[in-house]
Amino acid sequence: MTLPRGETPGSIPDQGAAMDELLSIGRFSRMCWLSVKALRLYDETGLLSPAYVDPVTGYRYYTDEQAPVARAIAILRSLDMPLQDIKPIVTETDPDAVRALLDAHRIVLEQRIERHRHMLQRVENFIRKGAVMTYEITTRNTAPTDVIGLTFSTSPEAISTDAGPAYHRIYDALSRVDTIPAGPPRMVYHAMEDEEWTIEVCVPVPDGGPVPDGLTRRRMDGGRAARAVHVGPYNELGMAYREMEVWIGKQGLTPAALPYDVYLNDPAEVKDPAKYETEIVWPVR
């Protein structure tokens, strides 16, 4: 696996990247779904160093080219692989050697197969894919939509754990007031501040009707939006958002409202995370 490493901290990368092409540690963390705390740890351990460290402020900056390494680290860490075992994988250039290292970890996971079956599938996905997905991004007009949901704070690593019970709460509440959902569930990203994200989980509903206790109703505006479909685990959505952000800029467009996910299939029915389908919608003008 040939993956770009960080440049020597304290100097602009050799590629001559201008400062406006560098990503702050906060922006890079949101793009890769890694906390700032984790990125600092990876810098301290020599696993992933920033491309540039401002000698005056000490601020860390990264490049788009470092994202595959960050995603590789995030995936392998989520599989309970120790940091000292990850470094040989992200620095190894021989695919067979990488496969051998990953197969060694497969044996560990197989000893806990009932609890870690989904992790084994993600190892397979990582071995097979090993590259950043590209997306077909288009624009379309969306209709105004009433949604019922709830908003709360979480961390990048805990989104899936926290969102599942929240959606169950919404669907149970809608069932009690005899409201049939008018579309697949959504997640709106209200704030993504380093260690703490504020998200809204919501479900489209028909106009009018009761609002269950403890939940809120609001109307999401319609209009022109950039959209793409991501197929794969939810924790890889950050790369899709980064690609869409770049695409929006190149098209001469600007974001008009908060972006959101639309979950096109149900993880309870689709057991393989590699087959999860998520529509990413970003209102633009």
Image: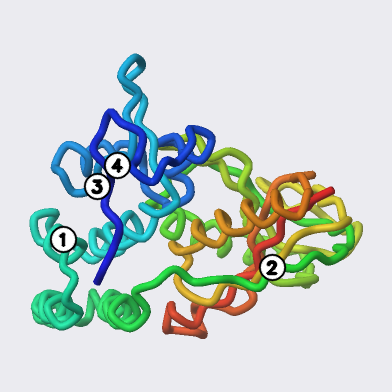
Q: Where does label 2 land, which residue? A: 137
Q: Residues within 10 Å of mark 3 (few under 14, many from 20)?
A: many
Q: Amino acid at mark 3?
A: Leu
Q: Is residue 108 left or right of residue 8?
A: left
Choose the circle earlier in sequence order: 3 or 4: 4
- Rounded to the nearest angstrom, the CA distance separating label 3 from label 1 is 11 Å
> What residue is rendered at 49% in x and 79% in y?
268
Task: State the SS at label 2.
Answer: loop
Task: State the SS at label 3.
Answer: loop
Q: Marks 4 and 1: CB-CB under 8 Å?
A: no
Q: Residues within 10 Å of mark 4 (few under 14, many from 20)?
A: many
Choose the circle earlier in sequence order: 2 or 3: 3
Task: State the SS at label 4.
Answer: helix
Q: Quadrant of residue 38?
A: top left
Q: Amino acid at mark 2?
A: Ile
Q: Where does label 1 land, which residue? A: 86
Q: Where does label 4 land, which residue? A: 39
| x, y percent for residue 66 | 36, 52
Q: Marks 3 and 4: CB-CB under 8 Å?
A: yes
Q: Quadrant of the N terminus?
A: bottom left
> What residue is rendered at 17% in x and 37% in y?
44
Q: Where does label 3 land, which residue? A: 48
**Looking at the image, which is closer to me, 190 or 50?**
50
Q: Nearer the viewer, mark 2 or mark 4?
A: 2
Q: Which residue is situated farthest in the top direction here?
A: 56
Q: Residues within 10 Å of mark 1 (few under 14, many from 20)?
A: some
Q: Nearer the viewer, mark 3 or mark 1?
A: 3
Choose the circle earlier in sequence order: 2 or 4: 4
- Rounded to the nearest angstrom, the CA distance separating label 2 from label 4 is 29 Å
Q: Marks 1 and 2: CB-CB under 8 Å?
A: no
- Rounded to the nearest angstrom, the CA distance separating label 4 from label 1 is 14 Å
For residue 170, the mark is none
